[in-house]
Image (cartoon, rainbow, N blue to C red):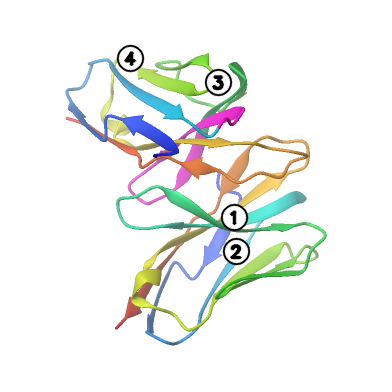
Amino acid sequence: DTAVSQTPKYLVTQMGNDKSIKCEQNLGHDTMYWYKQDSKKFLKIMFSYNNKELIINETVPNRFSPKSPDKAHLNLHINSLELGDSAVYFCASSQVRQGVGELFFGEGSRLTVL
Amino acid sequence: SQQGEEDPQALSIQEGENATMNCSYKTSINNLQWYRQNSGRGLVHLILIRSNEREKHSGRLRVTLDTSKKSSSLLITASRAADTASYFCATRDFGNEKLTFGTGTRLTIIP
């Protein structure tokens, strides 16, 4: 069973379009994350939710809107896509106790904006 | 911004040799973690070391942490071709849910 699954794996779209990436975890974790990995492999956190509540919102354009319908799901919707949004987006989950907890990552969703 | 700077950026060694990667960070941390990323895949957790620990082992992995120098190292002994991957350190500050990743070291094991 896949612990953290995200769909789609690949997205190719035109500038200006809107797209969504879905993520689900079956680990029973309370916290979920979205990370963006650019072409140089830099991995930067975008958002984090704990039990459906937004707890981390980095300086991300408001074209990016996360939604967590329940603690097992965290989706990412992107409006008005730009060339610079091309990257691999990773969903992750963790169960953090007193600051200690490892992240479990999905396989990534590669977004290409043309 | 990236919390950790990793050194070297890229490393190529012969199979069977040991590989050492270093990570430096800037803040006071609760713990430091190392992850591996195979090409085209997600990151996989390898090992976690808490701020009050100095060394930790897991199989062929050895991690050290020097909080006075704000640095950590990951040693992979008796490397195998399957160890070819990118390795990232990540730090979690006290009272912070955020795990901040370093810039990564790309390790290539030559058979």
Find disc 2 in the rendering and name its residue. Answer: B23
Q: Secondary structure at mark 3?
A: loop
In the rendered structure, which disc, 4 or 3, sits on the residue that comes first in sequence? 3
Q: Is residue B7 above or below residue B16?
A: above
- Determine whether label 2 and label 1 are within 8 Å by CB: yes
Residue A39 among those drawn in magenta: yes
Find disc 3 in the rendering and name its residue. Answer: A71
Image position, residue A103 (x, y; %):
56, 43
Label 1 – label 3 distance at C-alpha: 29 Å
Find disc 1 in the rendering and name its residue. Answer: B4
- Which chain does the residue under circle 3 lie in? A
**Position of B58 compared to A38: left or right?**
right
Amino acid beneath label 1: Gly
Amino acid beneath label 3: Lys
Residue B55 among those drawn in magenta: no
Q: Quadrant of residue B49?
A: bottom right
Q: Secondary structure at mark 4?
A: loop
Label 2 – label 1 distance at C-alpha: 6 Å
Comparing A34 with B68, the one in front is: A34
Amino acid beneath label 4: Asn
Label 4 – label 2 distance at C-alpha: 36 Å
Q: Residues within 10 Å of mark 4 (few under 14, many from 20)?
A: some
Q: Residues within 10 Å of mark 3 (few under 14, many from 20)?
A: many
At horizontal 68% and vertical 37% (from top left) the residue drawn is A96
Q: Residues within 10 Å of mark 2 (few under 14, many from 20)?
A: many
Magenta residues?
A28-45
Q: Secondary structure at mark 1?
A: loop
Find disc 4 in the rendering and name its residue. Answer: A79
